[in-house]
């Protein structure tokens, strides 16, 4: 969703919601790094649109942070599961090794 607004102060202002940029007189600014001097030149309607875009940007960043934290937690769960499975398999191998030693010893003593 992009909105094109005409301003009497600075010509054409283009709000790009896909990558959170604002194009002012052919110059592109990211919404979080726009300079105060450029913001001062925005009229009331453009400033309001800028505030909505900034709010949307902050919410999107919070969403990305939550997804990153969830991915880290999922990775930790997988690591814990792998450690548990490794421990179970190790115990099973040790148990099988002990029973195999007993069988070999029993076979050699019976002959």
Image (tube, rainbow, N blue to C red):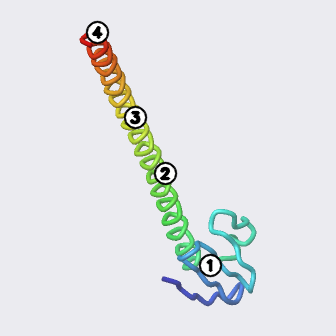
Among all residues in the image, which is located at the extreme top?
Answer: 109
Q: Secondary structure at mark 2?
A: helix
Q: Position of residue 2 (x, y in %)?
A: 52, 84
How far apart in space, not on screen, are marks 3 and 4 (Cα)? 44 Å
- In front: 76, or 5? 76
Badge nearest the viewer, 2 or 1: 2
Q: Crowdedness of circle 1 by 10 Å Cα count: few (<14), some, many (20+)?
A: some
How far apart in space, not on screen, are marks 2 and 1 (Cα)? 37 Å
Mark 1 or mark 3, which has the lower sequence index? 1
Give the residue pinned by disc 4. Answer: 109
Q: Name the disc covering residue 93, or none.
A: none
Q: Crowdedness of circle 2 by 10 Å Cα count: few (<14), some, many (20+)?
A: few
- In front: 95, or 109? 109
Give the residue pinned by disc 1. Answer: 43
Query: Contact, CB < 8 Å: mark 1 with mark 4?
Result: no
Q: Position of residue 45 (x, y in %)?
A: 54, 79
Query: Contact, CB < 8 Å: mark 2 with mark 1?
Result: no
Figure quadrant of residue 39: bottom right
Q: Secondary structure at mark 3?
A: helix
Mark 3 or mark 4, which has the lower sequence index? 3
Badge nearest the viewer, 1 or 3: 3
- In front: 81, or 57? 81
When the figure is inspected, residue 39 is found, relative to residue 6, above or below; the finding is: above
How far apart in space, not on screen, are marks 3 and 2 (Cα)? 19 Å
Mark 2 or mark 1, which has the lower sequence index? 1
Quadrant where the image shows the C terminus: top left
Q: Secondary structure at mark 4?
A: helix
Q: Secondary structure at mark 1?
A: loop
Give the residue pinned by disc 3. Answer: 80
């Amino acid at each position: 969703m992009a909105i094109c607004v005409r301003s009497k102060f600075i010509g054409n202002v283009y709000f790009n919601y896909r990558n959170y940029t604002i194009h002012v007189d052919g110059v592109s600014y990211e919404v979080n790094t726009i300079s105060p001097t450029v913001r001062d030149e925005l009229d009331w309607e453009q400033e309001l649109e800028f505030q909505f875009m900034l709010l949307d940007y902050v919410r999107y960043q919070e969403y990305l942070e939550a997804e990153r934290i969830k991915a880290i937690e999922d990775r930790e769960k997988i690591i814990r599961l792998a450690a548990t499975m490794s421990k179970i398999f190790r115990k099973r191998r040790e148990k099988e090794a002990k029973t195999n030693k007993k069988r070999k010893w029993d076979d050699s003593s019976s002959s």
